[in-house]
Image: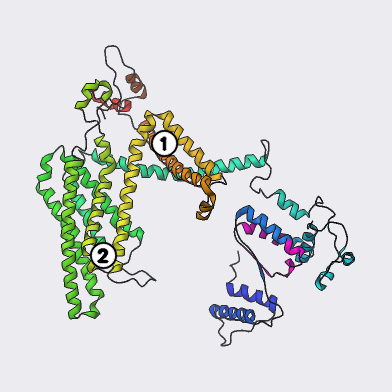
Amino acid sequence: MSSPKPLHEVLEEEYVSMYGPLEPPADGDNSEQARLANVYSAIHKRAADKKDPHPRTALCISGGGIRSATFALGVIQGLASANVLKKFDYLSTVSGGGYIGSWLSSWIRRHPDGVAGVQCDLQQTDTAITGRRPYADSAKKNMVLRDEDKKVTPREIPADKLDPEPAPVRHLREYSNYLSPKLGLLSGDSWTMASLYIRNLLLNLLVLVPLLALALAVPRVFSWGLDQRHRMPDLSWPWIAAGLTMLGFAYIGWTRPVEQSRGGKKGLFQTSDGWFMLLCVVPLTLASAALAIFWARVQEAPAALKSPDARNAAILAVIGMTVVPFVLYYTRYILARRSTFRAEFWRQLFWKVVAEFGAVAAAVATTAALLYLLAEKVFYEPLRTTPDLARKLPIERFDFVSSPQAQLFVCFAVPVILLVFFAQASIFVGLSGRKNEDYDREWWGRAGAWLLFFSVAIGLVSFIAVFGPVALYNAPVILASIGGGAGVAAAVLGFSDKTPANQKQKEKGGSVAAAGNFASMLIVPLFVVFLLAAISLGSTWLTQEFRDLPKGVTEAQVEAQKRPTRGTPPCRPNSPAPCPTSKPEERLMSRRTNCRPCR
């Protein structure tokens, strides 16, 4: 395969074909950049020459889909009728204009007489003047012809508007619906369109559904960590949280800007959003999960909270949030200004350090207070299960706390702790902002934005993953109808020409367009929530179906256990009562029947 031709050679050949020989660069430099600058100079020089007998013009057709192509066809026919079409040197198209532009270019290339023949054929479709007569007789009808028109080969104008158009124009009109030219139940085009739609939909789902299922698995991973009581010591979690917190804050001290960025290539201490999320937000998210798991473990072993390991891990976390980023940042700050070591610099540095030290102390103290309030007032019983009140008398239900505390802890423990880190950063910037530069405050705003985004995203995804399947399972008809109806309505509104596509159409659309826009804003998120809940429910079903059976237990035994025997109460799903099974293998089988006490 031949390599592509460089731009300077393309322009040189085009210039030679239109204007004749091109003078080489004056300094004899034959490099690519010199030749490109030389041809640019020659083109601009000729464009500025008003005495040029051959000025170049271009026909430009904008985009807008098939509507733009239809409008452009009428413009091209009008230009041909005015004997102007053949005078254009260039054709430039965009989007929908490319559809009609490629048709015109193809016709010009295939026509024996080129653009002049195309112009002549297009003039025959102009039905503004009726009657069939050669151009030579037009002077008898008192028509004024220009000299260039008289030189054109005589052609005939159609007698009426029903006269057939040239074959290329007729072909263009017949296949304007180019995706499915011929519609109908027995049309191959219709079934081809349907098969293409289904194929592309399935391919997109094969890519999107696993990614969405992976995102919805976040609360499952956190729940799995809560369940690893016998595989990892309780006191290892605070050390993990402290280490990850130190890593995230160290990255802040390493990349926090110390001078205004000049643009161009990024330096050693400049970072992108991707690296910031990977090395700061993700470690802080994992630290939040480790801290939440430790608090859940403390409920079973309260002595762990007052142990030396927990106290030392807390001290390490405080050092990681204060000393480590402080040393990294101010080392870089001083080195970046080593050429301005004057008395004024050291005085400003002193007050900057004092302001930031006070802000850090207030921010860390606020963080500790917020974590204490979360632990004692919000998630005071993180693993409390939801009782089954269906078997209780109405008067007895007042003695039970029915809020799903464990599920809410799985959904919102990590996002709320991330919000605590966000509040810590906000307090620091608010108290020290007067001593910091504008670019530094802008960087902190960007960092806080990503913390807030991760907190909201994890909370929403976890809530949908945990409560979505429950809602679909308990109310399949209603919620499925809402979700399916939302999907159909979203598709209909998307295809409707009443739905505005941009702000300009919204302003001109009136009440109908406003209602359609509001409906689409409401329906599309509803359908997305339904889709995510359905994926989560499907993941739950697959997990239960493909979970390995206990050793020595068969599917037949599991099915037999689901059928209650005489004298033995059945193992009811989600029952708060103790499980009637006693043997280990029976309890393991009960996990397959969704018995809550066995789980």
In percent of width and height, residue 493 lies at 53, 43
Q: Is residue 381 visible?
A: yes
Is residue 233 in view from this perspective? Answer: no
Q: Residue at x 26, y 53 (%)?
A: 284
- The percent coordinates of residue 154 (x first, y second) are 86, 65
Which quadrant of the view contains residue 157? bottom right
**Observer-nearest residue: 404 or 237?**
404
Of the pair 503 and 539, the residue shown nearer to us: 503
| First in residue order: circle 1 vs circle 2 | 2
Q: Main secondary structure of the magenta part?
A: helix
Asked if 15 appears above or below 485 in the picture, the reply is below
Residue at (32%, 71%) from the top-left corner?
260
- What residue is shown with label 2? 254
User: Label 1: how many residues lie within 10 Å, few (<14), some (14-19) or many (20+)?
Assistant: many
Residue range highlighted in magenta: 78-106
Q: Hey, which residue is sitting farthest top in the picture? A: 566
Question: Residue 286, image x and y in percent?
Answer: 26, 49
Q: Amino acid at mark 1?
A: Ala
Decide whether residue 40 is among the magenta residues: no
How far is mark 1 from mark 2, CA to CA?
A: 43 Å
